Image (cartoon, rainbow, N blue to C red):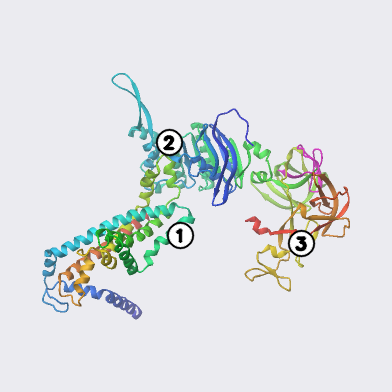
């Protein structure tokens, strides 16, 4: 009994350690004070400020379209890459597959500096183009990684069966192969969105000067050691946190449901 | 190799080879398939049968050679443009579609010429897709052919293996192909289901009247279903023929061994229509040159058991197994095991006689280019074979190994191995055997039984007394028949391989 209480207590301690900063942030998003630690009574005014601030709304919009664009392009590129690797001869595909996964373990700052160097040699430095390419470099390897296992699970003959029944290679790809790896493609897309949404390093090195995402904006706002300049960011952070929790819950519940369906 | 026939050839394979990353899967084969026949490619795994099928389907392109369909070159035609359909070993159904959509997949893509009459009364044809109604009709028919009426709305995952295979067949035949290719379609089914499907497939072949090309490693399946069997091994065709002719007249020892049960003996032709094996002469129907080395194949059901004194061979029963319809009796005749099938049984340990009629003896020319023996290693690290004992280099059995002072073999990884009594295969080339007038010299001795002049040298056969082991050798010296000679082989020319490795 004592053992059980201890083990539960320990788990609670670990969770508290992980979540207390975020909880603090959420709690203090409901009070109208400039600094955390000062409780001025319950209020929604920070949330009201947030939605009234054209600047923050613009930045939120920037972040979302960037994430959608980068994720879509990365998903197309990564899926095509995974299919190409899968259907290539082993002697060719093994090194390409390994090379495609290096950016995942490579330090992001190295990728960011390399991108900045590359684009500074061209007229495209700090443009939307360099920004999107930067985010694609970040996301594409993860798409390849999530599509690859789905291809391996697929019956290797189904593509050939489609050709055999008269489908052209492109029809066979879209009618037979893509539907079967679709869950992997979707997983890659969602992963790309989350990666792009909270990316700071690559964004900072490739973004146009006047363009900001939430990450770069928040970083600039708190750079000088204070969070007082825009308290509305507390509300924004709290909102993002809640949305993320909801997303994780929905994904887990759906996974559980499909598992039960299979049984 | 090709059979002569006036029938229409639907597929001709001309000098086709396929090489995958330096492995030769199919080695220069020539073959044709007659329209409407049920032809089976039969062979062990890795013999090139599936690769041949895949080249006909268009999934693999031959490295060299040509494939003709109705006389037209289709070697490089993509699979979607060929009038053939395939049934895959693991069905390859589309799991995201229901049964109807699986079967209709090919029909929905198909365009057929439709003839119209316009206002002026002129006729013209247009390539047009099938209507929904036509597709419904065809899918329904295909499902009834495979006995799955009413399964249209079911999903693939709710079907058993046998049902999935039926859907795969329906999906292929609904397109009315000229040729149906079947790649071990029954391999994943259980025995009872397989037997049922064999009969059904044969029935389907009869009803549809199209050409079936079937791939299997199961000789019984091939014998039951086929009009023609193509036996393959190591990418080469061993024999083409009807099931009966392949069973009764196997072209070589491999075919005999692969099709049905058989006893295969090493024999030598000793006189016209007389073959010697198991130390006895037998009358036979096939004729080869005198002293030619041959493989003798005797089917177990062609051996009759009798009293010891009446038998052509005498041996001791070492095992009796009841097989349902017959008994399988293994008889040890000297050092050879002979398998007999009979409806009568015998007791273990009985001494019995065996009789083989001339028409039960099938003789095949031996591809004889090297002397082969079964041997074993002694305590002294010499090798015993061919009624003699020879010095040899046992370190060749394990690459990178050496012998320690006590005579144990140390492998490249430092493992110590005692080779005493290890069974080995021994190979010696003709040119590496020397004979000597001094019979005591060398590892063994025997009489010269044959001398054939081969242009620039003589081919000599020395036969030992005890077990009648033959040593074939090339020499430039002239010897006399019946000379009693010693057989010498240099240790480095005795090639040894471990038995187990060969069984893999």
Among all residues in the image, which is located at the extreme top?
B121
Residue topped by disc 2: B174
Q: To which quarter of the image does residue B415 belong?
A: bottom right
Q: For numbered disc 1, what is the local secondary structure?
A: helix
Considering the numbered disc 2 on the image, is that residue within a helix, a strand or a loop? loop
Q: Position of residue B267 (x, y in %)?
A: 77, 46
Residue A95 got which mark?
A: 1
Is residue A20 at least partly visible in the picture?
yes
In front here: B375 or A99?
A99
Range of the magenta residues?
A: B270-298
Residue B487 drawn above or below residue B94: below
Task: Tell me whether marks 3 and 1 sit on the same chain.
Answer: no
User: Residue A9 placed where, x, y %?
Assistant: 30, 78
Query: What chain is tagged by disc 3?
Result: B
Q: Nearer the viewer, mark 3 or mark 1?
A: 1
Q: Residues within 10 Å of mark 3 (few under 14, many from 20)?
A: some
Within the magenta stretch, is there residue B271?
yes
- Same-chain status of marks 2 and 3: yes
Question: Between tags 1 and 2, which lies in front?
Answer: 1
Q: Nearer the viewer, residue B332 or B79?
A: B79
Kindly indicate whether the residue at mark 2 contacts the one at mark 1 (C-beta within 8 angstroms).
no
Say what secondary structure mark 3 lies in.
helix
- Neighbours of disc 2 within 10 Å: few (<14), some (14-19), many (20+): many
How far apart are labels 3 and 1 at the CA level? Answer: 46 Å
For mark 2, name the chain: B
Confirm or deny contact between disc 2 and disc 3 (CB under 8 A). no
Displayed quadrant of residue B392: bottom right
Q: Is residue A235 magenta?
A: no
Marks 2 and 3, how far apart in space? Answer: 66 Å
């Amino acid at each position: 009994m004592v053992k059980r209480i201890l083990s539960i207590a320990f788990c609670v301690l670990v969770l508290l350690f992980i979540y207390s900063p975020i909880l603090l942030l959420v709690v203090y998003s409901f009070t109208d004070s400039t600094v955390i630690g000062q409780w001025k009574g319950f209020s929604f005014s920070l949330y009201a400020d947030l939605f009234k601030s054209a600047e923050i709304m613009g930045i939120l919009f920037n972040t979302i379209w960037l994430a959608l664009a980068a994720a879509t392009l990365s998903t197309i590129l990564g899926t095509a890459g995974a299919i190409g690797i899968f259907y290539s001869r082993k002697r060719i595909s093994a090194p390409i597959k390994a090379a495609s996964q290096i950016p995942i373990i490579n330090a992001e700052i190295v990728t960011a500096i390399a991108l900045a160097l590359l684009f500074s040699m061209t007229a495209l430095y700090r443009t939307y183009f360099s920004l999107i390419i930067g985010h694609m470099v970040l996301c594409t390897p993860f798409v390849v990684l999530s599509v690859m296992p789905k291809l391996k699970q697929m019956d290797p003959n189904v593509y050939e069966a489609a050709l055999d029944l008269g489908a052209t290679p492109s029809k066979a790809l879209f009618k037979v192969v893509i539907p079967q790896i679709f869950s992997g493609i979707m997983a890659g897309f969602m992963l790309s969105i989350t990666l792009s949404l909270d990316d700071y390093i690559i964004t900072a090195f490739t973004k146009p000067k006047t363009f900001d995402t939430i990450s770069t904006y928040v970083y600039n706002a708190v750079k000088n050691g204070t969070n007082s300049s825009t308290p509305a960011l507390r509300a924004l952070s709290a909102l993002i946190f809640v949305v993320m929790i909801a997303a994780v819950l929905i994904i887990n519940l759906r996974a559980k449901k499909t598992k039960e369906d299979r049984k | 190799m090709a059979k002569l026939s006036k029938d229409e050839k639907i597929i001709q394979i001309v000098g086709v080879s396929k090489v995958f990353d330096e492995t030769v899967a199919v080695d220069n084969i020539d073959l044709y398939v007659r329209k409407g026949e049920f032809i089976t490619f039969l062979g062990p795994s890795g013999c090139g049968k599936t690769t041949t099928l895949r080249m006909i389907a268009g999934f693999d392109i031959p490295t060299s050679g040509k494939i003709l369909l109705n006389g037209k070159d289709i070697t490089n035609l993509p699979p979607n443009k060929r009038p053939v359909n395939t049934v895959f070993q693991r069905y390859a159904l589309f799991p995201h579609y229901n049964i109807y959509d699986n079967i209709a997949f090919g029909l929905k893509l198909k365009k057929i010429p439709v003839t119209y009459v316009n206002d002026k009364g002129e006729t013209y044809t247009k390539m047009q897709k099938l209507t929904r109604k036509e597709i419904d009709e065809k899918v329904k028919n295909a499902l009834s052919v495979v006995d799955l009426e009413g399964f249209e709305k079911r999903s693939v995952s709710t079907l058993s293996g046998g049902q999935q295979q039926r859907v795969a067949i329906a999906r292929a035949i609904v397109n009315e192909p000229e040729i149906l290719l079947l790649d071990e379609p029954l391999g994943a089914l259980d025995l009872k289901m397989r037997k049922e499907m064999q009969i059904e497939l044969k029935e389907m072949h009869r009803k549809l009247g199209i050409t079936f090309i079937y791939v299997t490693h199961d000789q019984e399946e091939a014998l039951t279903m086929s009009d023609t069997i193509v036996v393959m091994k190591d990418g080469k065709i061993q024999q083409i023929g009807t099931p009966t002719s392949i069973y009764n007249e196997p072209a070589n020892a491999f075919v005999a061994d692969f099709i049905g049960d058989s006893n295969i003996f090493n024999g030598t032709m000793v006189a016209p229509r007389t073959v010697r094996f198991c130390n006895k002469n037998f009358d036979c129907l096939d004729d080869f040159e005198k002293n030619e080395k041959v493989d003798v194949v005797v089917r177990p059901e062609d051996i009759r058991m009798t009293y010891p004194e009446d038998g052509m061979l005498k041996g001791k029963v070492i095992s009796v197994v009841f097989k349902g319809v017959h008994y399988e009796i293994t008889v040890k005749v000297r050092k050879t095991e002979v398998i007999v099938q009979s409806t009568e049984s015998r007791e273990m340990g009985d001494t019995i006689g065996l009789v083989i009629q001339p028409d039960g003896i099938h003789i095949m020319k031996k591809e004889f280019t090297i002397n082969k023996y079964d041997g074993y290693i002694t305590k002294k690290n010499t090798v015993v074979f061919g009624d003699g004992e020879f010095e040899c280099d046992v370190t060749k059995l394990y690459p990178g190994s050496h012998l320690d002072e006590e005579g144990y073999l140390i492998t490249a990884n430092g493992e110590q191995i005692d080779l005493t009594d290890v069974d080995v295969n021994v190979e010696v080339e003709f040119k590496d055997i020397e004979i000597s007038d001094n019979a005591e010299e060398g590892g063994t001795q025997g009489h010269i039984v044959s001398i054939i002049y081969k242009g620039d040298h003589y081919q000599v056969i020395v036969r030992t007394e005890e077990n009648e082991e033959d040593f074939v050798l090339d020499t430039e010296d002239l010897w006399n028949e019946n000379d009693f000679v010693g057989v010498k082989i240099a240790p480095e020319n005795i090639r040894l391989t471990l038995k187990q490795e060969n069984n893999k």
